[in-house]
Image: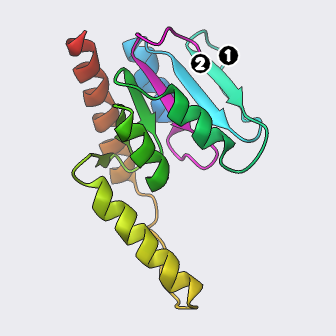
Amino acid sequence: MVASASAVRILVDADACPVKEEVYRVAFRHEVPVAIVSNSRLRVPDHPLIERVVVPGDFDAADHWIAQGADARAVVITADILLADRCLKAGALVIGPTGTPFTTSSIGAAVATRAIMADLRAGGDAIGGPAPFAKADRSRFLSALDEALVRLKRQG
């Protein structure tokens, strides 16, 4: 990890993350370390605040690494609802790539909806996916990440 466990840091579930560049921008401005966690090697900026973590193994290896590092001083970036649930239980702040925060009060409904959608897909129902990623999502994400980092820094 690029920082001690007591330092504010960002953990990114990076394999399919559309907002990595935005994470770098906000992290550099706040001088907060970032771990880019993936199952395969991704290009990341050569910067002392950025750590590339490539986890070998099964499909969930990156999720396990992130969940183990999640705590009350971490902001986790993921679209994975089950990973978000694990990180919330560890005390982390969790933000989806569209800027929507996962919270302890919203995660139960998100997990239930995920299960229902999986059942529908397994039954052969044709259901649409998420809306295309939009400029407004990017803007909302930048704002949410900035707010989360300010909040954690104030908490000391």
- Give residue 137's position: percent from left, percent from top: 36, 51
Image point (72%, 35%), residue name: 42
Residue 113 in view, yes or no = yes
Mark 2 element type: strand
Magenta run includes residue 47 = no
Image point (49%, 41%), residue name: 19
The residue indicated by pointer 2 is 50
Looking at the rendering, in which quadrant would you find the N terminus? top right
Q: Label 2: how many residues lie within 10 Å, few (<14), some (14-19) or many (20+)?
A: many
Magenta run includes residue 12 = yes
The residue indicated by pointer 1 is 46
- Residue 100's place in the image compared with 111, above or below, is above
Q: Nearer the viewer, mark 2 or mark 1?
A: 2
Residue type, mark 1 in image: Asp
Looking at the rendering, in which quadrant would you find the C terminus? top left
Residue type, mark 2 in image: Ile
Instruction: State the extent of the magenta-drawn residues as a range.
Output: 1-20
- Give residue 152's position: percent from left, percent from top: 27, 20
Residue 96 in view, yes or no = no
- Residue 27's place in the image compared with 126, above or below, is above
- Give residue 28's position: percent from left, percent from top: 46, 16
Image point (28%, 36%), residue name: 143
Q: Left or right: where does residue 16 sit relative to residue 77?
A: right
Image marks 2 and 1: residues in contact by CB distance under 8 Å? yes
